[in-house]
């Protein structure tokens, strides 16, 4: 195969999905059944009860190993019950995924703690989100849903590289130097790390190499270099707010998001068909745009350019959000090929539902940047009232910050114990 097959495919797919974005319907989306205020309030009451019960149970995690078994069973029964009430059942997603998730989660968290005991929970959860995305891709590709060294290594690169490049305390020159040296390692060059940070990055590459031989999986390593380049290009647009006509703002986000999940897919399957590459890239673009909408205010404050943060300064987000709904629905509702087996099609429907909820969440967090008419219209379809959603995040943050356990465990300790099998 051509040495540049992945780079060429990424450029082709980026153009395809940018073109599709510009052809999206900007009218208010079709969102199914409206949810009455009465039903929302019932759901809110149930969610409040669940959160209170959940944290109360987490605080009761015992020291005794034998007692922990009963404690864990009660905890997972509590979570499963609320998931079923929200229609997130094994039947609606995939049995193997639902069954493997606790095991994979525990294995990953345990490995993180062994690799870096000081990693904060928010960074760990950021990495864990990517682990679950790769597990979802395992279902789509009909690969066993499991933890692998490659899944660990690539998921850890998120908090290590993305957050380092976004850190305003790190000089532009240092970012350039580290980025250049890491790129050389991704290309296969054996270079000695200059510091502990580089040593961790190089270790992650070594873990991937232990699972996938470079000579046999050239495209996989091309995909890793491609996402590295896309991340670096994204950081370059963070230096200042300029006109969107000066920089390809949409293209940069599309390439970063698409290349990221494309690398996920390669690390799950080793090799990909053109149609598998297409879906992975499209799904990555979708997730990136949802993240960009979620982070619009923060990006604007930090001078990070996305189509949403640039819009935020002068126009409401109504039409852009409508476009995102249409973009999501169009991509996820496409033919199931190359996922023409029942479980893969079911998983695509599950992903589509989750994307809608992700957009709802982003709207709730950016309520002030929509027209009053839009908020009034969209709120009819949200699972909770807009005011409740805002309070919910504050409540969760408060409970997390003030967490104390009877046995002296931290919240991180309790989560690890809860996922032990």
Image (cartoon, grey):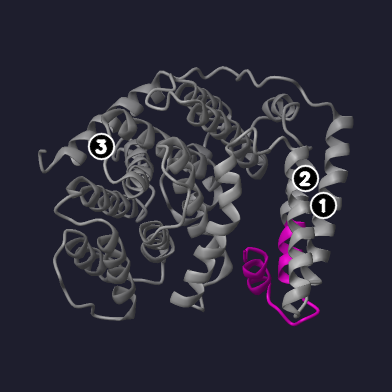
Q: Is residue 179 above or below residue 228?
A: below
Callout 2: few (<14), some (14-19), or many (20+) C-alpha neighbours within 10 Å?
some
Say which residue label 3 marks. 10
Which mark sits nearer the N-terminus, 1 or 3?
Answer: 3
* Residue toward you, 27 or 349: 349
User: In the rendered view, does 421 fall on the left or right side of 236?
Assistant: right
The local secondary structure at tag 3 comes to: helix
Q: Are marks 2 and 1 in contact (CB under 8 Å)?
A: yes
* Alpha carbon separation for disc pair 2 and 1: 7 Å
Give the number of the mark in front: 1 or 3.
Answer: 1
Q: Is residue 31 left or right of residue 8?
A: right
Q: Is residue 344 magenta?
A: no
Whether residue 403 is visible here, answered yes or no, is no
Is residue 90 among the parts visible in the rendering? yes
State the image coordinates of residue 326 (x, y, percent, origin top left). Answer: 51, 22
Residue sitting at 33 percent across and 44 percent down?
Answer: 269
> In the picture, which quadrant includes the N terminus?
top left
- Counting residues from the start of the chain, the first of labels 3 and 2 encountered is 3
* Magenta stretch bounds: 394-421
User: What residue lies at 29% left-to-right and 40% top-to-bottom?
Assistant: 247
Give the Cα distance between marks 3 and 2. 40 Å
Residue 260, numbered circle? none
């Amino acid at each position: 195969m051509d040495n540049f097959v992945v780079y060429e495919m990424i450029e082709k797919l980026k153009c395809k999905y940018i073109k599709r974005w510009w052809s999206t319907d900007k009218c208010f989306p079709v969102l199914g059944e409206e949810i009455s205020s009465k039903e929302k309030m019932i759901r809110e009451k149930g969610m409040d009860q669940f959160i209170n019960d959940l944290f109360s149970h987490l605080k009761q995690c015992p020291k005794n190993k034998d007692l922990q078994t009963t404690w864990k069973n009660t905890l997972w029964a509590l979570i499963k019950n609320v998931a079923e009430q929200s229609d997130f059942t094994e039947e609606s997603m995939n049995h193997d995924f639902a069954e493997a998730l606790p095991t994979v989660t525990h294995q990953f968290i345990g490995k993180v703690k062994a690799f870096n005991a000081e990693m904060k929970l928010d960074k760990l959860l950021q990495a864990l989100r990517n682990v679950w995305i790769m597990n979802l891709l395992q279902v789509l590709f009909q690969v066993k849903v499991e933890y692998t060294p490659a899944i660990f290594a690539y998921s850890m690169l998120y908090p290590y590289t993305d957050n380092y490049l976004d850190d305003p305390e790190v000089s532009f020159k240092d970012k350039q130097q580290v980025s250049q040296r890491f790129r050389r390692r991704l290309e296969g060059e054996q270079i000695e790390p200059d510091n502990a940070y580089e040593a961790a990055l190089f270790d992650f590459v070594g873990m991937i190499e232990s699972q996938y031989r470079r000579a046999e999986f050239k495209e996989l390593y091309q995909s890793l270099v491609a996402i590295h380049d896309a991340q670096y290009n994204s950081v370059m647009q963070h230096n200042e707010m300029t006109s969107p006509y000066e920089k390809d703002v949409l293209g940069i986000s599309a390439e970063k998001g698409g290349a990221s999940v494309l690398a996920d897919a390669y690390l799950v399957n080793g090799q990909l068909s053109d149609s598998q590459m297409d879906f992975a890239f499209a799904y990555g673009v979708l997730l990136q745009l949802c993240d960009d909408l979620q982070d619009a205010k923060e990006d604007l404050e930090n001078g990070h350019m996305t189509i949403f943060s640039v819009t935020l300064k002068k126009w409401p987000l109504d039409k852009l959000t409508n476009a995102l709904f249409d973009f999501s629905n169009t991509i996820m509702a496409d033919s199931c090929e190359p996922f023409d087996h029942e479980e893969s099609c079911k998983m695509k429907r599950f992903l589509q539902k989750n994307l809608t909820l992700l957009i709802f969440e982003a709207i709730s967090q950016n309520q002030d940047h929509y027209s009053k008419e839009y908020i009034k219209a969209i709120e009819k379809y949200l699972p909770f009232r807009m005011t409740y959603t805002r309070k919910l995040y504050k409540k969760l943050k408060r409970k997390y910050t003030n967490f104390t356990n009877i046995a002296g465990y931290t919240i991180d300790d309790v989560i690890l114990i809860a996922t032990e099998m």
